[in-house]
Amino acid sequence: MKHSRFWTGLSIGCVGVYLALVSFFSDLLKPHADFVLFFWTLAPPLWFWVEYVWLVSEEEKSDTLKLARVVHGQGLASRIWLAVLAILGALFAARGWVGSSVWDIGANV
C-alpha cells in the first residue's frame, strides 16, 4: 500500500507540473485563471482530509509512530501547497490574469 501511494502521488504530481507549465506558457490558462486559483485553494486541503479519513488505515491511525509519520507528511505537503499557491497567485497577478474572467461577466451585459 505504501509504495502504490508513493507512485500514484509522484505520477499525479509530475503530470500536474507538466500540464501547468505547458498551459501557463502557452496562455491556455488565461480564460480559466480564476477557476485554477479557486481549485488550487480548495483541492489540496480536501485531499488531505480524504487521505486521512479514507486512505490511512486503522492500523496506521492506532500506531503512534505511523500516525506521526502521516501527520508529518501532511504537514510538509501543506507547506508545499501554500508555496505553490502563493507562486501561482503571484504569477497570475503579474500577467494580469486574476479577476478578469469571472467578475466582469455582469459588466458586459
Image (cartoon, rainbow, N blue to C red):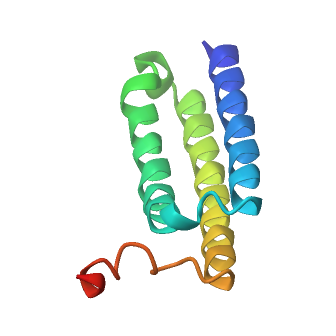
Q: Which residue occupies the foreground of this view, 52 or 31?
A: 31
Residue 33 at x, y percent in the picture: 52, 66
In this rendering, the answer to whether 64 lies above or below 20 is above
User: Which residue is farthest top?
Assistant: 1
Quadrant position of the N terminus in the picture = top right
Q: Which residue is drawn at 47% across and 43% down?
A: 48
User: Which residue is farthest bottom?
Assistant: 107
Left or right for 36, reference 105 = right
Left or right for 80, reference 59 = right
Residue 89 at x, y percent in the picture: 60, 74
User: Which residue is farthest front?
Assistant: 109
Q: Which residue is drawn at 46% across and 33% down?
A: 51
Image quadrant of residue 95? Answer: bottom right
Left or right for 75, reference 34 = right
Q: Which residue occupies the foreground of this view, 65 or 34?
A: 34
Q: Which residue is drawn at 39% across and 35% down?
A: 50
Residue 43 at x, y percent in the picture: 45, 49
Count of numbered labels shown in the rendering: 0
Image quadrant of residue 102? Answer: bottom left
Quadrant position of the C terminus in the picture = bottom left
In this rendering, the answer to whether 23 lies above or below 73 is below
Image quadrant of residue 57? Answer: top left
Q: Which residue is drawn at 55% across and 43% down?
A: 71
Q: Which residue occupies the foreground of this view, 60 or 92?
A: 92
In this rendering, the answer to whether 29 lies above or below 62 is below
